[in-house]
Image (spheres, grey):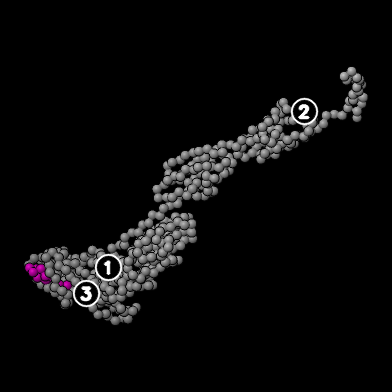
C-alpha cells in the first residue's frame, strides 16, 4: 500500500514522492557446518543481526568461526554484521587437531613419541630392531592386532594414541645330539611333522616298520607366522638351506620315511612366504643280520660296551662263592640273539674263557673263570641255541657264578674284568 507524501525540489522543479506502510522483509540465514554438527537456520529481518549459534562440533577438529564466503576469507561478526535484503549462508571454518602418538616397541627399550594431524597421513615411521625377531610394522593393537599403520595411513583416531610394534620371530632351531645309546631299527625311521602352539616339531618313530620309538629328542622349529596351518613341507637327504629348498626337495604332508642312515634336512614354508629349515641325522638303521653291541661303555654309532666289573669275594679259605645276575634288555622291535660273551682282563688278571659249568681261580697266576646260566625261550616255546635269544621289547636275565680252589690270601671286591655282550638281529619271524 503506497500513499502520496508531497513534493520536493528537484533541480529547480517540483517532484512528488511516495511512502509505503509495509514492514521490513524477512531473510533466511543458513549455516554450512562443513562436516561439523548441523546448525539450525535463522529467520532475520533485513538490516538486523543474526544470533550467534552455539559452537558446533566436528571429530578431530577445533572450530575456527563463521565466514560469509565459502573460501573462508571473510569472517562474520555477529556483534557487528547485519543481514541484508537477501538470504545468506554462513560457512564454518575448522582447524584439524594435533595429537601425540606413542610408540610401544613391544619387547625393546626404545619408547618414543611424535605428533600427527588428524585427517593427515602418519608420515615416516621408525623401524625398531629386536634380537631374534624381524619387524612386521606398526599396529593399533598389541601383538599385531588392530590395524596395520603405514606412512600413508590417514590419522583417524581423535586423540592421543599408541602404536604397537609387530614382530615375527626368527626361527631358533635346536637339533640336539642323539643320546649315547640309540634304539636300533631293522628297516626304517618314520619322521613326522606336527604343529602345535605355534611351533613345528619333528618326531622320530619306527614302530610298525621294524622297531619302537626312535630315541632322539625332536628338533623344534619356531614359526615365522601366526597360525598352525598353511604350511608346505619338504625334505631331502643331505644338509640344505632355505634357498636350496625353494626349487628342490620332496614335498610331504605329515611324515616321510627314511630307509638309510645319513643326514637329512626338512623345510617349512608359510603361505605368506616365510621359511625355515633344520638338519638332523639318522644313524641306527640296520640291515637284518647286522651286529650291534647292546650295552655301552664308550659309545660309537652302534658299537657300545658295558663295563661289567665282576665283584669277587673270597672267603678265608680262598673259595669264591659270589653269584650275581645280569639283565640285558632288548628295546628293539625284533628278536636279537647273544652269540658271544667276551671277557677282557683287568688289574693284572687273566680270564679263562667260558667253556664249562665252573672254573678255578689260582691267585698266584691271577686266573679267573665263570659260568653263565640260563637260556632264552623263543616265541614258539623252544629253547634257543647259544647263550640266548631276547625277543623284542623284553629282557633276559643271566646268572654268573664264580668258583675257585683254595688260595693263599682272601681278597674282597676285586675288579676282575669287563664283560661285553654282543647282539645281532635274529632272522626268526615273530
Query: Nearer the N terminus, badge 1 or badge 3?
Result: 1
Q: Considering the whole magenta stretch, tell me its main secondary structure.
A: loop
Residue 298 rendering spot, x and y as whole percentages: 23, 63
Cα–Cα span, label 3 and label 2: 124 Å
Q: Are marks 1 and 3 in contact (CB under 8 Å)?
A: no
Cα–Cα span, label 1 and label 3: 17 Å
Name the residue rendered at 77%, 28% in the picture: 48
Q: With 2 as the anchor, is 353 left or right in this view?
A: left
Q: Secondary structure at mark 1?
A: loop
Residue 364 in magenta stretch: yes
Name the residue rendered at 89%, 24% in the picture: 17
Q: Quadrant of the N terminus?
A: top right
Q: Which residue is mark 3?
A: 340
Q: Quadrant of the C terminus?
A: bottom left
Q: 332 or 233: nearer the eye?
A: 233
Image quadrant where residue 274 sits: bottom left
Q: Nearer the viewer, mark 2 or mark 1?
A: 2
Q: Secondary structure at mark 3?
A: strand
Q: Are marks 2 and 1 in contact (CB under 8 Å)?
A: no
Residue 299 rendering spot, x and y as whole percentages: 25, 64
For label 1, count other residues whose C-alpha is less than 10 Å away and answer few (under 14), some (14-19) or many (20+): many
Name the residue rendered at 16%, 68% in the picture: 344
Residue 121 disc label = none
Residue 131 in magenta stretch: no
Residue 302 disc label = 1
Q: Which residue is mark 2?
A: 48
What stretch of residues is rendered in magenta? 361-370
Amino acid at each position: 500500500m503506497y500513499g502520496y507524501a508531497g513534493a520536493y525540489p528537484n533541480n529547480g522543479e517540483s517532484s512528488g514522492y511516495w511512502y509505503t506502510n509495509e514492514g521490513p522483509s524477512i531473510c533466511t540465514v543458513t549455516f554450512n557446518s562443513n562436516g561439523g554438527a548441523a546448525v539450525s537456520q535463522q529467520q532475520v529481518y533485513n538490516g538486523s543481526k543474526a544470533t550467534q549459534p552455539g559452537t558446533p562440533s566436528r571429530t578431530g577438529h577445533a572450530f575456527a568461526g563463521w565466514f560469509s564466503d565459502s573460501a573462508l576469507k571473510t569472517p562474520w561478526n555477529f556483534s557487528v554484521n547485519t543481514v541484508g535484503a537477501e538470504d545468506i549462508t554462513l560457512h564454518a571454518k575448522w582447524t584439524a587437531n594435533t595429537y601425540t602418538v606413542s610408540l610401544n616397541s613391544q619387547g625393546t627399550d626404545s619408547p618414543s613419541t611424535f605428533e600427527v594431524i588428524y585427517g593427515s597421513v602418519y608420515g615416516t615411521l621408525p623401524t625398531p630392531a629386536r634380537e631374534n625377531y624381524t619387524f612386521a610394522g606398526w599396529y593399533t593393537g598389541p601383538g599385531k592386532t588392530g590395524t596395520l599403520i603405514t606412512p600413508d595411513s590417514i590419522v583417524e583416531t581423535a586423540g592421543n594414541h599408541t602404536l604397537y610394534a609387530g614382530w615375527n620371530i626368527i626361527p631358533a632351531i635346536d637339533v640336539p645330539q642323539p643320546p649315547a645309546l640309540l634304539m636300533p631299527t631293522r628297516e626304517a625311521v618314520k619322521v613326522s611333522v606336527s604343529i602345535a602352539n605355534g611351533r613345528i616339531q619333528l618326531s622320530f618313530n619306527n614302530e610298525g616298520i621294524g622297531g619302537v620309538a626312535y630315541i632322539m629328542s625332536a628338533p623344534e622349529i619356531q614359526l615365522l607366522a601366526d597360525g598352525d596351518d598353511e604350511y608346505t613341507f619338504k625334505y631331502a637327504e643331505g644338509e640344505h638351506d632355505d634357498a636350496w629348498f625353494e626349487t628342490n626337495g620332496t614335498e610331504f604332508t605329515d611324515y616321510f620315511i627314511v630307509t638309510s642312515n645319513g643326514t637329512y634336512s626338512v623345510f617349512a614354508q608359510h603361505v605368506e612366504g616365510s621359511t625355515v629349515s633344520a638338519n638332523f641325522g639318522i644313524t641306527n638303521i640296520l640291515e637284518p643280520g647286522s651286529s650291534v653291541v647292546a650295552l655301552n661303555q664308550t659309545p660309537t654309532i652302534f658299537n657300545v660296551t658295558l663295563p661289567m666289573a665282576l665283584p669277587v669275594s673270597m672267603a678265608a679259605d680262598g673259595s669264591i662263592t659270589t653269584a650275581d645276575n645280569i639283565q640285558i634288555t632288548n628295546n628293539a622291535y625284533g628278536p636279537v640273539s647273544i652269540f658271544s660273551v667276551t671277557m677282557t682282563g683287568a688289574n693284572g688278571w687273566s680270564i679263562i674263557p667260558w667253556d664249562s659249568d665252573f672254573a678255578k681261580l689260582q691267585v698266584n697266576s691271577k686266573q679267573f673263570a665263570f659260568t653263565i646260566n640260563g637260556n632264552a625261550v623263543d616265541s614258539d616255546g623252544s629253547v634257543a641255541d647259544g647263550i640266548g635269544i631276547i625277543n623284542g621289547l623284553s629282557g633276559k636275565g643271566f646268572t654268573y657264578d664264580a668258583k675257585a680252589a683254595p688260595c693263599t690270601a682272601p681278597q674282597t671286591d676285586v675288579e676282575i674284568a669287563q664283560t661285553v655282550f654282543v647282539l645281532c638281529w635274529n632272522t626268526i619271524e615273530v
